[in-house]
Image: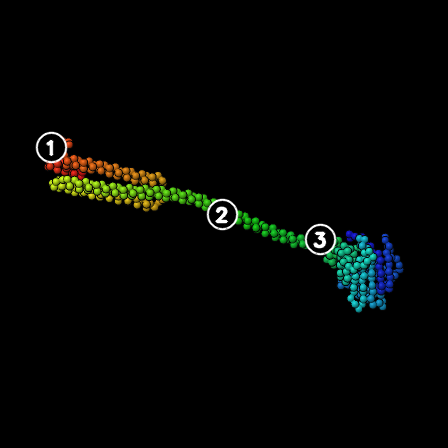
Amino acid sequence: MSNVTIVKKVKIRNILSHENTEITFPLGLIALVGPNGAGKSSIVDSIVYTLFYNPQSAKGFRGGSKRSLLRTGASDGLIEVELSVGGRTYIVQRFIGISKPENAMLIEIEDNKKKILASGVSKVLGFINEILGIPSSEAIRYTIVSRQNELTAFIEDTASSRRETILKLLGLDEIEKAKDLLKDHLKKIEGDIKLFEELNRQYEGIKKQLEELNNIINEKLSRREKLSKEVQMVFDELKSIERVKDLVYRYNELKTLKEIVIELNKLRKLQDLCSELNRLELGEMISALEIYGNAKKRIDELKKQLYEIDIKVKNTIERIKNVSDFRFKENKIDEIVEAIERYLDEIKRIKHTRVAEVKFNEDSINVLKNSTVCPLCKRELNDSLKKQLINDIIKHIE
């Protein structure tokens, strides 16, 4: 016990052989001396009964009933024990009656003032155990105070009961409880370990799956990057195609301008022919008409050739527009563009050559018409020779 406990005084009224007894115990060792039956054991029993006995226990005190505790002829009795615990003074009262329930009271005395701490047998006994710091009443009855025949009863008790009592006496019953709790806790820990191992196994599986998913994601990202480059290439090719379209548009504009120039030249020629017809005589008008007819025929043939050339150019452009594989290389497009440009240059060159030839021949015809002497041989020209030379020039034009 953590605090020093001293029994200072005991009062006994109508208990066992004591009618009205009050004993004050001095400090130090105390011996109760007297003949058999003088009431020595009754004093010790009264103290033990007051402090530790619960009437609800299966066994009666001294093996008997409450009546056996009362003095013969008495209907009630009182035991009062005054004790000091750790310097604090307490009074414990136990009231025993035949016709009424047993009662108890715990009082603390401080500065000569009384203060009731507990009332009722169970509450008082619980409070006493708490004040004395003992695990149970049995710890006192089997260690410090041993009543007559109680040691014999302890020895003859069952092994499990003795074990339980000894554990209580040693304060190890709580350790046993803790042991049982630890067993349960250990089982829980073992279960947690198994759960952890299972979760760890699942974690490893999930980790492996994550690694596989990361590999798949990396492959997808690589594929995406590759596709992005391919898309960029397609965009670049589309830009190249747009350049081709722009060239085709420029070509169409040039062709339109060329047609306009041709028509203008035709109009100029017609105007020149009309002017010439006004100056020519009837024979010369007939020759001029023949020349015009032949020239018109040649112009129609040239138109036909230009039309065929335009068809070929349009077909080439359509093939360029209908290219299904947009992934051809930039240099291929450049080659096509260069070929178109060369083709246009060749057309321009042929055009200029033809125009120059026609202009030269027209000038030659005009010179012959207005001259009386051949510019080459210097001989005199008549109408017949003029017509022959003009026809030769027209044939050459054709």
Residue type pointed to by label 2: Leu
- Residue in the foreground of this view, choosing between 228 and 244: 244
Q: Where residue 254 sits in the image (x, y, percent)? A: 28, 41
Find numbered disc 1 in the image and state the secondary structure of the residue it sits on: loop
What is the quadrant of the C terminus in the image?
top left
Q: Earlier in the sequence, mark 3 or mark 2?
A: 3
Dot 2, how many residues are within 10 Å of its Cα: few (below 14), some (14-19), or many (20+)?
few
66 above or below 231? below
Q: Where residue 88 sits in the image (x, y, percent)? A: 80, 54
User: Can residue 316 be seen from the camera position used here?
Assistant: no
Residue under circle 3? 175
Q: Determine which of the numbered discs, if any, sits on residue 380 in the image.
A: 1
Name the mark nearer the viewer: 3 or 1.
1
Dot 1, how many residues are within 10 Å of its Cα: few (below 14), some (14-19), or many (20+)?
few
- Distance from Cα at disc 3 to Cα at disc 1: 156 Å
Find numbered disc 2 in the image and state the secondary structure of the residue it sits on: helix
Residue type pointed to by label 3: Ile
Residue type pointed to by label 1: Glu
Task: State left or right for residue 7 relative to residue 295.
Answer: right
Residue under circle 2? 213
Q: Where residue 34 sits in the image (x, y, percent)? A: 89, 59
